[in-house]
Image (cartoon, rainbow, N blue to C red):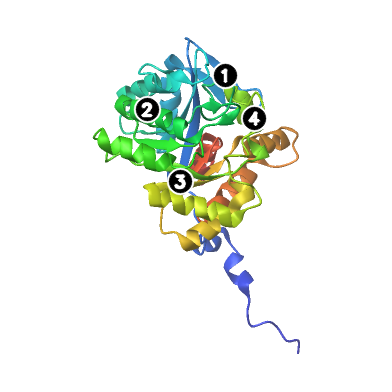
Amino acid sequence: MATYPQLRLRRLRNTAPLRALVRETKLTTEDLIYPIFVTHGRDLRKEVTSMPGIYHLSLDNLLDEVAEIKKLGIPGVLLFGLPKQKDSLGSEAYEEHGIVQEAIHVIKQAIPDLLVITDVCLCQYTDHGHCGVLNGGYVDNDRTLELYSRTAISHVKAGADVIAPSGMMDGEIKAIRATLDHEGFNHTPIMAYSAKHASSFYGPFRLAASSSPQFGDRRSYQTDPANGRMALRELQADIDEGADIIMVKPAISYLDVIARARDRLDYPIAAYNVSGEYSMVKAAAENEWIHEETVVLEILTSIKRAGADIIVTYHAKQAARWLLNQR
């Protein structure tokens, strides 16, 4: 008589209900945050050529977008602004009536309970494309902190719920936290882009935001992709400075960093499924090399399985529709 294995793990995979019953990681729409690019003008809904399905939106078209996001059950958005003009100090980033500040007003008047997170950086607003103030061709860390703080305050005064500093300047979380507290916004949380790597996956975003550096690169301030231990130090440093949520960016190539952070740090972890990761999937799907729905949901589930509590992703709207259809 043939011998059979006593351990039969396939027993729990036989049917869809069984698989669902024992599923360890369950992706939901509540896990997702949708990034939006807002721009000046009227009646603008211009598709980003490097990111199919993603648009530059004028404020009059922003209302329909956020209404759809709310209807899909996505809890919040992450705002990026395209300024009227750029200068060496990124002035529109912290203007009272800058594009992001105006977008916050529009969203909060229409859908007050939609979570509005704002990116705090200067790269979209500077004419040189770097994330801070230049001093002889070098990004001046400490002079930049004041402008980040001014930007954060302008966003919160406009109604932002969460501030998300992304410039990777040393001490930025401490500076912004101190400024928020001094101005009476001690209740406003900070979601820090703590382990933001000097990645090649940002290309489509930089085309969308016209934020590529005009010279050099950002390797002197963004984390080296080869250094996992350094990434953990960055995460801990931002916690020590007052971050409420820490982020790993990009997501797919840094699942190990997310997992190590989850094991060591008892803080909410966000992961940014960035533009290059999004656009590669879109390109493969358009060529019918992959099945987009199953690949996207597998990617997002893997990010959550690694330990992310929050997933910032350009796939959010499509993923939400697919998840709703599965119910």
- The disc, 2 or 3, on the residue closer to the chain's N-terminal end is 3
Q: Nearer the viewer, residue 129 or 164?
A: 129
- The disc, 1 or 2, on the residue closer to the chain's N-terminal end is 1
Q: Is 315 placed left or right of 267 in the picture? A: right
Which residue of the protein is positioned furthest toward the left in this rendering?
184
Where the N terminus falls, by quadrant? Answer: bottom right
The vertical placement of 255 against 50, above or below, is below
Does residue 120 appear in this view? no
Q: Amino acid at mark 1?
A: Asp
Question: Which is more foreground, mark 2 or mark 4?
Answer: 2
Whether residues under marks 1 and 2 lie with C-beta atoms below 8 angstroms apart, the answer is no
The vertical placement of 100 against 189, above or below, is above
Which residue of the protein is positioned furthest toward the top in this rendering?
42
Q: Which residue is mark 2?
A: 150
Q: Is 155 placed left or right of 52 in the picture? A: left
Question: Which is more foreground, mark 3 or mark 1?
Answer: 1
Q: Residues within 10 Å of mark 4 (few under 14, many from 20)?
A: many
How far apart are labels 3 and 4 at the CA level? Answer: 24 Å
- Residue 127, which numbered label? 1
How far apart are labels 2 and 3 at the CA level? Answer: 30 Å
Mark 2, secondary structure of its residue: helix
Q: Which residue is mark 4?
A: 204
Q: Amino acid at mark 3?
A: Asp
Q: Which residue is mark 3?
A: 31
Question: Which is more foreground, mark 2 or mark 3?
Answer: 2
Q: Amino acid at mark 4?
A: Pro
